[in-house]
Amino acid sequence: MIRQIHYTSCRHGRDGIQGFQVAAATTGIPPHHENLVLPLAAYRPPPSASAVPDRAEIEALPVALGYRDFGDVAVLFRSCYLGEDYTGRQGNYFAHVLVADDADDLRVAPPASAWDAAAWSRIPPEDIRTPTSLPELTAVESGPLADGTAVGDWVGRAPERFARLLDAVLAALAGRLGKVVVVAGGQQPDAEIAVAVLAVTAPLPHPLARRVSFTTFSANPTEIDLLVVGTTPDVPVPQGRDTVVVRLDGPDEDGHASPFTSLAVDRLRAGPVAVVALQALAAEAVPPVGHGDLDAFAEAARLLAAEPGADVVAGLEFVADRLPGRLGPDLWAAVDEALTAGTARPEDDIVRWSAVLRRTGGHTPQMTSRYLRAALTHVAGGTGGAELWLPEINPDQIDGDGWIAAVMGIDPRPEVVSALLATLRRLGVEPSDEELGEVVERVLLPVVLDPHGNLDPIRALPGAARLASVTIARLESRLDDDLIETAAESMSEAAAHWLAPSAAPGTRCAVVIAVALARAGARDPVAVAATAADGAQLDRLAALLWPEPPSAATGGRLLAVLERDVLTRSALPAWLAERLVVDAREKRSGRRHVELALQLGALGNALDERTRTRVEAVLLTEEFRNRPRSDPSTRERAVSAVASHADPALAEPLARVVVHWVFACAESLTHADLLRAAFSTRSPGSAAFLSHYREQLTRTLGTADTAGVIAVLPALVHLSATWQEATELLGGTCASALSQRRRRALDELGQRLSETGSVPPDLRPGRAASWTAWWTQYRASQLAGAGLRDRVWRLGRKG
Amino acid sequence: LHQRCPDSCGDDATTFRTGPVCPHGRSPTPALYCPGDGCGRRLERDYIDTPARIIAVVGSSESGKSTYVGVLVNELRNRIGEAFDGASVEMVGDASRKRYREMFSDYLFEQGRTLRRTDSIRALHALEPLLFMLQFPRRGRLSGRVKLMTGITVFYDTAGEDILDADRRDRLSRYLTAADGIVFVLDPLQVPSVRAAVAGGGALPTVAQDQVEMVQGVAEVLRGSRHNGRVTTPLAFVVAKIDALTDLLPPGTTLARPGNHDRAYDETDGQQVHDEVRAVVHGWTNGATLINLVQNTFSDHRFFGMSALGFSPVSAEQLSPQGIHPLRVEDPMLWLLARFGLIPTRGARR
């Protein structure tokens, strides 16, 4: 329903006053609607207009055809200048306003086509007392512009002006501009602006066109609240950031036209039928075409019309998303044409093509083939591809080996090759073993044997196990014995993990992998060593796993898990014994070393001599550290300890504990046995024993340990008959130490020596008849000056 | 007040409350804008910095309100300035200058035409103001120093028919209630007894609106919800077109000669004019009612008589070929300015 308003300055109007008022109106227009629309329809002549124009001048003044959709009401108006009013004063105008509840009710689309329509009242009715109500209208018939001739001509003449105006209007629709001021000169600036507005709004989707409010003329563009405001060159145009001025009176300039602009030009020049078809296509879009979608919509329209020059993928995207009803053979035929013509190239933006093809169906063989090639080319280019959509095809259609060979020739990085392999697998294409072997040779082995090689892309492949098997086979064939160490050193942990399931036990690859994992801390080296089938394998593994002798703890675990047969046929026990020596040398021996020695000792005769000596040294050291009770067996082991040929690092602590033990026993015969063994043997053990013995002897004689002295002296005296070393000890160490003792202590020693039972009967005091005689003689010869006077004198000399 | 982002903010530019920087950290443009919802008009710096007095001009249709404003501004800018020791009156802002030139001065002083009809407030988004700044030199009585008295005056010209319609009066109310002074222009040629008296003496207005009704309309707007008490806004009740009433005025009337407002508003002269005009009006149709209505409605009012053109137009569109010779057109304005304290007053007050 369309209601009408006539507004002018008159004597007899609906408002019942004299002056500007609603002269007549259809009943039922709410006052607030009148208040909305009347300011839009207000008219003021351009500044250059004559102050008192004559009839011809008035008719030449621009007419304001305007439109605005307020949401709850849409208004279309035509305002023109009348000159004088009933009082004879200038400034009067007549506005014929059509008010509709909805813009569609106006039934003139776009509204600018109402220019010069027959429905407009051009002058007010006679200013007499007449009924002031106007009838409702059912529709507004379009004016002469509706045939499209004028619009097509104008667009053809000034495509750049059209483009600028359209861009400005779209920017305003997008909210980036507040107002577009269109300046037109010439004889009929209002008509030209009407044509321009019609040209801009006709190709727009209907919902957008409805939003383009406009007037073909305003003498005050700043104030009027419309999106497109036409004016004449004599009107000062507003300057402001949110206002753009498009001049239709200047020369047309070449410039860039957006896809929608170009399409609009084409359709407008083709005539109303083409424009209507475009509108119809836009009306199919769900959701409706917005101002930001117009270029994509234009591409879709061109694609659907099989016009060259369309951005096919953009058009395809729009059709797929917004015009699903248009997805069909015709569309794909158009795409095929573009592919054939070379205007559509999936390889230029494979990701977009992938996305749009993923959500569409009915692709032609050419489309599929071209896309597939582009996708594989994309993958081969090393820019990924896992996310790309792939069509379902017969795998025989693809030369997988050829693609692989090509990729390896171009970019043999694992990620590239793996992406290609993954893509081929997604397509159901399995490469031949020969080609996979080539992949392994040229791509994988260098990465597998690179400590920092990145195998992640390969490992992630669904068919990675097959590749791993091929890799193992190739690697095994290359692994000579002397390369195992190198391979184990070079292999990254990731590679070892990946290959491990494919390596058969006992193979060189298995060794390399196990060692690599053990070195990386991913496997227990002991467990790896435990896989050795024989002594030789164990030796090889041990050498790879432990460049230094394994720790005592590891050694213990090794001895616990390894087969005795394998162990005894290997050099591992000796290698472990070396750990005993090394740690003893560095004073780091402890409980674990003893346990290791015990485990090694359990191997018994299977140990070689050197190892056994080392082990025994450790065990004896531990035994005598605990000061065992003296018995024949113990004494026998003490004698063998003194004679030990173990490394000095082991012999020295052994000697020390044995010396401590023998002095603790305080048995003359034991002293004698051990000293005899020491004097009669030239070994690291005897040398260390004598050294420690002298020290302990000095300490014992220097103290009041009478029992200790009574145990030592007879042994030395007894051995001095045979061994010069004993004589030297008596005359040297003993004499020096005893000289420090008091006469009374020496007397007591003599007394103890003379007592029956103090000295074993087996020990005789050399040539002396008795121990008393020997002591007397020894004191006289060796300990002269041991009295108080002599000690004071010596003290004085020292002081 | 609001400011706007500089151009460098591009599409992100916005309007914001005044501050040293815009929301994007840049220096804003110096211009200031109205913060009112849906307004956003640029505000003249002088308007913000200087105390402003709003004067609304109302009256019946064809009473000559626009002509009065157009001539008054010209008088203030030229003749009155000289009378007040070089006082200056300048339009403020491009919009006022442009509007005055296009809507007033070109017609009146360049082309010798009557002004175009003023459109109704219904068809206007807002009344378009004329802003001008007045600067009066004023010498201190003790110090002798010259002090510059400055004020902004805002004129709102209204369409006469808007007073007669309730809906339009509502729209006018925001302007009238905000006004510091009201100039009510009465067209004597629309008063039946005067029309009869001057019949044949020249072109009469085609309309004859009831002047009592007009004053009542204004009073209604100003009273608003207050039904008791008088309106305190000063009202200058101006009888226009006195050049057409020469035969109806008493002999030797002060209205026939210019006012003597030299360096100050002459209160004695003003009182005399007030008395004479009131007496004249009293004799017209509904004159007593009109005077009573004014007296009972406006506590601060004064009657004036003036002729904006000096000679009646020869037609609805054409001014007299003798040109524009205003008479006492400045009186109401000077009275209001004296009320505002911008100019001194001379002579006794009753």
Image (cartoon, grey):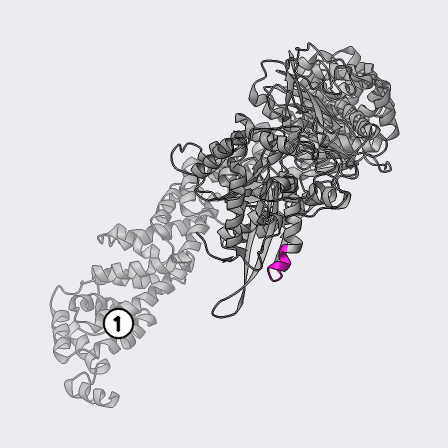
* Left or right: residue B135 compared with residue A202: left
Residue A620: x percent and y percent? 33, 52
Q: Nearer the viewer, residue A325 or B259?
A: B259
Residue B113: x percent and y percent? 74, 39
Above or below, comparing residue B346 to residue A114 in the picture: below
Q: Residues within 10 Å of mark 1 (few under 14, many from 20)?
A: some
Which quadrant of the figure has residue A762? bottom left
* Left or right: residue A260 compared with residue A738: right
Q: Nearer the viewer, residue A576 or A736?
A: A576
Above or below, comparing residue B37 to residue A321 in the picture: below
The magenta-colored residue range is: B80-86
Q: In the rendered picture of this protein, how many numbered marks are placed on residues?
A: 1
**Which element type, helix, strand or loop, lies under badge 1?**
helix
Residue A110: x percent and y percent? 74, 19
Q: Can residue B7 be seen in this snapshot?
A: no
Q: Look at the image and say whether residue B81 sits in the magenta stretch.
A: yes
Residue at (83%, 35%) from the top-left corner?
Answer: A185
Q: What is the chain identity of the residue bearing mark 1?
A: A
Q: Amino acid at mark 1?
A: Thr
| Image quarter of the C terminus of chain A | bottom left
Q: Nearer the viewer, residue A309 or A238?
A: A238
Q: Look at the image and say whether residue B350 sits in the magenta stretch.
A: no
Which quadrant of the figure has residue A238? top right
Q: Can residue A665 be seen in this snapshot?
A: yes
Residue at (66%, 46%) from the top-left corner?
Answer: B71
Q: Nearer the viewer, residue B10 or A108?
A: A108
| Image quarter of the N terminus of chain A | top right
Above or below, comparing residue A476 to residue A120 in the picture: below
Residue on which disc 1 sits = A698
Residue A470: x percent and y percent? 67, 28
Q: Residue furthest front?
A: B251
